Amino acid sequence: MDGELSTALSLLAIGMITVFIVLLLVVLTGNILIRIVNRLSEDQISAAKVAAISGAVEAFTQGRGKITKIEKD
């Protein structure tokens, strides 16, 4: 029984470590991809996007909303 328990615990540990490493790789790859895309994308917001945002705010707030600043993160 002790041999089966130690085998089960070692398999549990190996499985948890494997899942942790895979999830860590997913997060790191995602962060790298986000940084690459942000560097390659345009720095300024186009006039069409500003017009679309302004129109959406106008429609949603029924003319009471005011846009003071639009930033790209």
Image (cartoon, rainbow, N blue to C red):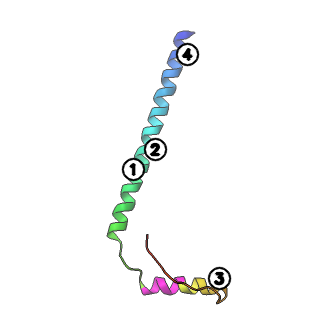
Residue at (52, 21) in percent of width and height? 9
Q: Amino acid at mark 3?
A: Phe
Query: Which residue position is annotated with label 2?
Result: 23
User: What is the spatial separation of the Cα atoms under label 4 and label 2, in whole angstroms?
Assistant: 27 Å
As for residue 50 lying within the magenta part, the answer is yes
Mark positioned earlier in the residue sequence (3 or 2): 2
User: What is the spatial separation of the Cα atoms under label 1 and label 3, in whole angstroms?
Assistant: 37 Å
Query: Which residue position is annotated with label 1?
Result: 28
Say left or right for 38 vs 48: left
Q: Amino acid at mark 4?
A: Leu
Q: Any mark on residue 5, and which?
A: 4
Q: Is residue 7 above or below residue 42?
A: above
Across and down, in percent, residue 27 comes to: 43, 50
Dot 4, how many residues are within 10 Å of its Cα: few (below 14), some (14-19), or many (20+)? few
Mark positioned earlier in the residue sequence (4 or 1): 4
Query: Which residue position is annotated with label 3?
Result: 60
Dot 1 and dot 3 residues touching (CB under 8 Å): no
- Closer to the eye: label 3 or 2: 3
Mark positioned earlier in the residue sequence (4 or 3): 4
Task: Locate the N terminus by quadrant.
Answer: top right
Q: Amino acid at mark 1?
A: Leu
Range drawn in magenta: 47-53
User: What is the spatial separation of the Cα atoms under label 2 and label 1, in whole angstroms?
Assistant: 9 Å
Find numbered disc 3 in the image and state the secondary structure of the residue it sits on: helix
Say left or right for 6 vs 37: right
Residue at (34, 62) in percent of width and height? 36
Say left or right for 65 vs 47: right
Mark positioned earlier in the residue sequence (1 or 3): 1
Find numbered disc 4 in the image and state the secondary structure of the residue it sits on: helix
As for residue 71 lying within the magenta part, the answer is no
Query: Which residue of the protein is positioned furthest toward the front in this rendering?
Result: 68
